[in-house]
Image: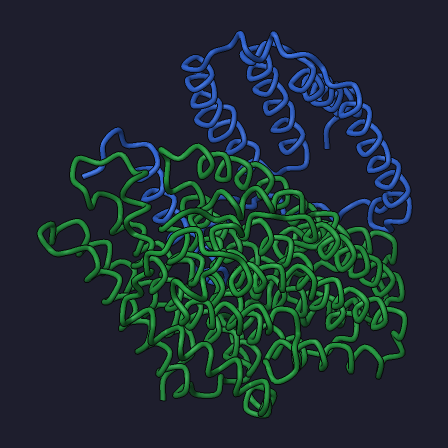
Amino acid sequence: MIPPFLFWTFALLLLVFGAAVVLNRNPIASALSLVISFIALSALFMSLDAFFIGIMQVLVYAGAVMVLFLFIIMLLDLRAEERRKINVVATTGGALVALAFFAQLYLVIGQLRIASQPFAPLPPKTDDVRNVGALLFSNFNLPFQIIGVLVLVATVGVIVLSKRELR
Amino acid sequence: MISAPVLEFATVGLGLLLLLIEAFATTLPRRTIAFAGILGLLAVFVATFFVATPPPNGGFWNFYTADPLALFFKRFAIITTILVLLMMIDYAPVVRAFVHGATTEAGVGEFYALPIFTCAGLMWMASAIDFIMIFVSLELVTVSFYVLVGFMRRNAASLEAGVKYLILSAVSTGFLVYGITWIFGVTGETNLARVASAVIAGVDRGPALFGMALVLVALGFKIAAVPFQIWVPDVYQGAPTPVTAFLSVGSKAAGFVVLLRVLAPFFMLPEVQRLLVGIAVLTLIYGNLAALPQNNLKRLLAYSSIAHAGYLLIGVVAFAGNAIAFYLVAYLLMTILSFAVLVVVSQTGGDSIENFDGLSRRSPFLAFAMLIAMASLAGVPFTAGFFGKFFVFDAAIRQHHIALAAIGVITVACGFYYYFKVVRAMYWEAPVANTAIPVSALTRVAMVALMIAIVVLGVYPTPVLNALR
């Protein structure tokens, strides 16, 4: 368990920078805000003793995926996004849908019994990485193999769609 | 006798083999890859009839089932893929024109090989009885469709369709995963059977329904139900025509299997029933009314695909697996037939209904095939489409959903108008050109087989109805 003030700090960081991703007009500022919200999220995972997911969040998302994002943004024309006018009707509609969704979420969380119960503490020496690996190759072997096929299809697709001149 | 999972692994193996042939046998004509794929899939199809009954339980069988429903839809997926591959052979010149390649046949090999992987994904979806399995197999199907929809990358419409499909589909996947986490949070299970027993034992009702509603959003996207249909017209119109056919038959059928399986644990909750009735009514009315003013046949078929999702949803509300299965078979036959005719005709002009003007004089065979397809889509008696609608309405009335069946019958009348707009163009308008339209022998055979199947199932539907027993 972590002190509550740390939870509130990270949760607030997550939300503020999450909003910044959407509100920023500059794509690079958006992408960097996303990095910070990923790091705050990973801190929340760590506070729940899910160290492996926390580390993965930083390595994969904040690291690899975001670097890719930034590269692509730098290759694109940034001005177009900054010049774009805000569509008032669409923004209002989207905001209303989001608001309705959050109202629903608020009501539903109130009804969730496990939300108000503390979890039993994990055994002191839980080896996250070993557990995840063992599960992937035993119980969840079939979905894991299907993901292999999925990655292959994605690879073929990337080559077909992006290679300058196919042979 | 073979074990059921071998079917998918054989399909994936076939796909890998075709990719290797594509990479190393560079002098081989690309059509060979398509023919090899068709032959391989036929072998897998035959193998589905020799599947051993699965053992009661085990680690693997928590995710995967080989019940009659699964086997039926595996065969469905294979037949769809074979017909799509046949259509792709006819469509190859168009793809060649819009792919940037060093040689004239660049990229066509991948175009033939990717549907095999989609087929494997569809087969896994048919067998999935666990949310994790549903998620990964759905993603395999979706990712391969991202590539196929945007395949003609020098064609602006195809690229636009690809981007739209990618973004909206990714959003719907987000809803699916979020819904699954809620259901997992409430029940502590991802296996559908164990979710069902947890729901019966009593769970937090609100959160469980919330998760279910989110999952419904994602599946509604896959089956093109209103209000999740925004992507359908643009994507269907822009994608390469065989891919449109694949999307509208394969993706939709797999979506309905998953819908039936996912709904089973939640079906006794009255809220879920009401939600489904609402979606079905909206889908029926929107799909049929929006199809009325369309002049582009591909777009017309897109709206008709939404309308058919509405009729299928009536079957889901009545929870009539047999009626849905029969409807999907009829839908497969008539949709693929109309797209196959469209592929041939559009290469002499375009996709719009005007290009079908006077088709009966340019190619009586194609016009007749289209006539059968349109009659069946509209639901004229003595075609498979009629019985499809009949069984669905019958199931709804037995479950006392009279109003829903009545709305269905009224919208069918709407359908007659827009489907027969095409027939009128073919038989009553003056031809746009006097040149005959050539049809390859293989395509002709496939079309004749589809026409015969439509008429035979329209008179004698028992074999398909018995297939699920």
Q: Nearer the viewer, residue B388 or A46?
A: B388
Q: Nearer the viewer, residue B78 or A136?
A: B78
Q: Give the green chain's letter.
A: B
x, y (%) of residue B70?
Answer: 54, 76
Residue for point 73% across, 73% down: B315
Q: Quadrant of residue B421?
A: bottom right
Q: Quadrant of residue B362?
A: bottom left
Q: Is residue A130 visible?
A: no
On screen, residue A154 versus residue A34, left or right, reads: left
Residue for point 79% across, 66% down: B266
x, y (%) of residue B432?
Answer: 44, 51
Residue for point 41% across, 87% down: B49
Q: Give the blue chain's letter.
A: A
Relative to residue B131, is residue B201 depicted above or below? below
Q: Nearer the viewer, residue A145 or B414?
A: B414
On screen, residue A63 versus residue B304, left or right, reads: left
x, y (%) of residue B147?
Answer: 41, 44
Q: Quadrant of the N terminus of chain B?
A: bottom left
Relative to residue B240, is residue A13 depicted above or below? above
Which color scheme is applied?
by chain
Q: Nearer the viewer, residue A97 or B249?
A: B249
Relative to residue B419, is residue A46 depicted above or below? above
